[in-house]
Image: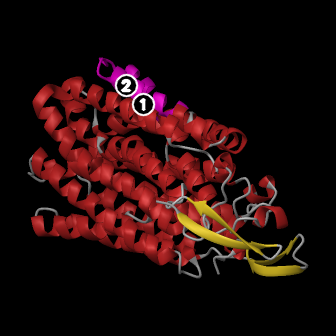
Amino acid sequence: MTSLDSTKKDGRIIRRTSPPVFYGWWIVAAAFLNLFFAVGMIFYGFPMFYPALVASLGFSHAQTTQGFLVGFLVIGPPFGLLSGYLIDRFGARHVILLGIGLIGLPLIAMGFVTHFWEYEVICILEVLGYVLAGPISNQVLITKWFCARRGMAMGIAYLGLGLGGVVSPLIINSLLHACGWRIAIEIIGAAVLLFLYPIGILVTRSSPSDLGLEPDGVAEGDRADAPPWTAPARWEFLKVLSSRDFWLITAGSGLVIGAMNAVIQNFIFFLEGHGYSSTQASGFLSVLLAMSLGGRVVVGLIVDRAKKKKNTMAFCYCLLGAAIPLLYLASMPTMVVLFATIFGFAMGADYMLIPLVTVECFGVESLGKILALIVMGYSIGQWVGPWVAGRIYDSLHSYNPAWTLMILATVAGSCMIYRLPGPKATAYPLQGAGMTVKGNIDVNILGEQ
């Protein structure tokens, strides 16, 4: 069915039909699946392979995450900036399609690994695929399609990441027991290609203008009377890089996400070291990731109404750090469940809040390049954290000192985010409107107030 809209022109009532569902929600569905497979299944499911890599190939705990660390240190920054340029120049759709191949094919190749250097090379290719098809592209994609309900759209899309994380430990654990780690990882790689390529080709579109549409929350016809909806954010790119806000977001999110990933990537090792079976450990990890779904839904609904999104982000980071001390009591299953509940809920809001706070500070012009640098910055922390935790365990045969270090990192990161000024008041002339609109540097000056 279609709905009827009426407008008046020269005294006549003109009726036109409009689609019953805004196409942006199909974009959200595509981003949901991208994040489900390319991030949720890989990022959260890959630690299930670590014990097998240690047992089969003789890797240390630190080496299991070292390949990704090297990838983000060497490949991440230059290709992250390149991906931002490509997104702004050619659109997120083409970048995502390229990234899908660089995620799926290396996973299939990993089933044939016999040496550590081969593992490192494949991990570096995985990082490149993650940079192109992961959070950066999908965050920009949703930001361009949505204005009034951006927080809700981002939250729904990021449910895919959380849901992928919930099911991946269970699926991978079953595959490991059924066919061994080599065939299991090849199956995951093939699934990425078979599901995401059709979605990217048939559904994904880089911006509303590709279909002659306006972003959600921008009325039809506004484009002809006013600057494009991205116009209010006229920050020179180099000025952004030299601003205090950029480095507060990058360093703050890097510290907290590094601590978060240190826990996630070592969680299976940690629990098995406390006597839990691999099935029990995967179950606890699934509980943690299931709670992250609730965090994404709740925070996605709240953040659209928040005057300062950075305060919501700082609170979630504090809550995440407050849960880590419960790991000192991991010998008690109830404490592990309590940890998984609190940590998972807070973790659910982490990635989805970063683009919203970035837009709050800088707007959407050059968002691809800005987010690329922020994501690459926190991604270095994302893999330094697990590597450091693994090194601490290899040296001291205990994760407790690592957890203490991660608590301190979350405190520091939360303080940095809280120090952000929030939306900046400014004024922008609306061409043809005969007036000046005063509002936030965020795009909600176009109708989201």
Q: Amino acid at mark 1?
A: Cys
The answer to whether the residues at label 2 and label 1 have Cβ atoms under 8 Å apart is yes
In magenta segment, residue 173: no
Q: Amino acid at mark 2?
A: Tyr
Is 428 positioned to the left or the right of 213 in the image? right
The residue range painted magenta reads 98-126
Residue shown at 51%/51% (left/top)? 27
Residue shown at 30%/40% (left/top)? 46
Along the line of sight, which residue is nearer the eye, 346 or 120? 346
Magenta segment, prevailing SS (helix, strand or loop): helix
Which residue was labeled with disc 1? 123
Q: How is the image coloured?
A: secondary structure
Label 2 SS = helix
Q: Position of residue 345 (x, y in %)?
A: 33, 68
Residue shown at 22%/54% (left/top)? 285
Q: Position of residue 36 (x, y in %)?
A: 37, 47
Residue shown at 56%/75% (left/top)? 309
Q: Position of residue 53 (x, y in %)?
A: 24, 30
- Residue 237, labelled with which disc? none
Which residue was labeled with disc 2? 119
- When asked about the image quadrant of residue 228, the answer is bottom right
Q: Is residue 109 above or below residue 384?
A: above
Q: Position of residue 279 (x, y in %)?
A: 11, 47
Along the line of sight, which residue is nearer the eye, 367 or 75? 367
- Image quarter (top left, top right, bottom left or bottom right) of the C terminus: bottom right
In magenta segment, residue 120: yes
Label 1 SS = helix
Toward the front, the furthest residue is 12
Specify few, some or many for label 2: CA neighbours under 10 Å numbering under 14, 14-19, or 20 or more. many
Is 409 positioned to the left or the right of 362 in the image? left
